[in-house]
């Protein structure tokens, strides 16, 4: 499809990508009542799903996937859930393995290409709930999972009507390189510290799975992916993981209406993360590249973010595409 011309115009101070990203990650607050459901996975592990509901029962649901080291109560997730609830659509906020406040049962956990867990979540929703129209929305890592799921050859149930991917590092190798630049050092270090902490906790529970010297060798996110993420999830190394899990290679196969919103001033994204060619060559793929927004920082009026408004608008119009 032709590239969508964005209408996003943030308040003056939030035109700065760093400010909009930090404000959205650390300061924004959302009040939302949620109900937790735990589902058991085929491998004996579990996932926690946080549900919130509209006052109107119209059999529609948005499934929301968070980013790296996020969870189902992060404002960029609950903000979308609340906006959809207000407009007649139920929401379920997924907590990836180990992200709900309780460590998962396996040595492995989640990663940017873990579409198998999404398949199980969707199968659970379709078999146990009563939704005719299901929409998928992800932020960052969660967005990459959604795009990969939609394009890698999975059976997409007829109930899945549309997808939305926001601030998506669809070229994982390029995005990883960006995160290791000086301009992103604060973000990089903020991600790395809890990841290493959790890995040390896993070592206590699975002492034969990783050596002390391997953990001590982790100085960067790339090291973490090389030492843990890749090995724990069946990849050769970090580059093999990035190559096989990057959603960019699957975009041409997406067959339902799908919107990508990536801000041009998102410092996490490399040039390859703006899939202009892929969007132009796939009638189901819509690419919007606002000048502003940073990383998941599309601040707008009344604490409803631009990407949340656009997501609702997109799913409401998806039947007409």
Image (cartoon, rainbow, N blue to C red):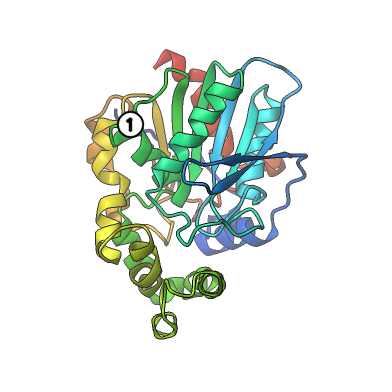
Rendered position, 211 above or below 97: below
Number of numbered discs visible in the structure rendering: 1
- Quadrant showing the N terminus: top left
| Along the line of sight, the residue nearer the viewer: 211 or 80 | 211
Secondary structure, mark 1, is loop
Left or right? Give the position of 243 relative to 317. Answer: left
**In this view of the protein, which residue sits in the foreground, 211 or 56?**
211
Quarter where residue 21 is shown = bottom right
Left-right relation of 52 to 151: right
Near mark 1 (Cα within 10 A), the count class, few <14, some 14-19 or many ≥20, is few
Toward the viewer: 191 or 277?
191
Give left or right: position of 170 versus 303: left
In this picture, is 272 found above or below 204? Answer: above
Q: Which residue is mark 1?
A: 154
Q: Quadrant of residue 50?
A: top right
Residue 261: image x %, image y %? 43, 41
The answer to whether 145 is drawn above or below residue 69 in the figure is: above
Residue 163: x percent and y percent? 44, 31
Res. 272 in view: yes
Residue at image location 29% in from the left, 61% down from the top = 173
Does residue 7 appear in the picture of this structure? Answer: no
Residue 132 percent across, percent down from the top left = 54, 15
Above or below residue 99? Residue 284 is: above
Rendered residue at 49%/55% (across/down): 295
Report the front residue among 101 and 16. 101
Q: Position of residue 321 (x, y in %)?
A: 39, 17
The residue located at (41%, 33%) in the rendering is 259
């Amino acid at each position: 499809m032709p590239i969508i011309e964005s209408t996003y115009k943030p308040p003056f101070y939030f035109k700065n990508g760093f400010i909009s990203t930090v404000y959205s990650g650390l300061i924004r607050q959302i009040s939302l009542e949620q109900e937790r459901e735990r589902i058991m996975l085929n491998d004996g592990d579990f996932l926690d799903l946080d549900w919130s509901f509209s006052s109107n029962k119209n059999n529609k649901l948005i499934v929301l996937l968070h980013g790296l080291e996020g969870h189902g109560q992060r404002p960029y997730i609950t903000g979308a859930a609340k906006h959809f609830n207000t407009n007649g659509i139920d929401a379920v906020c997924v907590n990836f393995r180990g992200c709900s406040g309780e460590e998962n049962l396996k040595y492995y956990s989640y990663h940017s290409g873990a579409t198998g867990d999404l398949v199980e979540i969707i199968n659970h929703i379709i078999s146990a709930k009563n939704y005719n129209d299901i929409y998928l929305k992800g932020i960052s890592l969660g967005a990459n999972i959604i795009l990969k799921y939609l394009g890698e050859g999975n059976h997409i149930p007829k109930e899945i009507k549309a997808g939305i991917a926001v601030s998506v590092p669809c070229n994982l190798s390029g995005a990883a390189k960006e995160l290791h630049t000086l301009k992103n050092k604060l973000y990089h270090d903020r991600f790395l510290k809890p990841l290493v902490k959790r890995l040390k906790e896993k070592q206590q529970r699975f002492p034969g799975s990783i050596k002390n010297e391997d953990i001590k060798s982790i100085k960067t996110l790339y090291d973490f992916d090389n030492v843990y993420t890749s090995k724990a999830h069946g990849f050769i190394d970090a580059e093999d993981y990035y190559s096989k899990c990057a959603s960019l290679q699957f975009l041409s196969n997406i067959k339902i209406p799908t919107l990508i919103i990536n801000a041009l001033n998102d410092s996490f994204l490399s040039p390859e993360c703006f899939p202009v060619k892929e969007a132009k060559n796939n009638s189901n793929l819509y690419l919007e590249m606002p000048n502003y927004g940073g990383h998941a920082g599309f601040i707008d009026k009344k604490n409803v973010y631009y990407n949340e408004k656009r997501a609702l608008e997109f799913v409401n119009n998806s039947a007409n595409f």
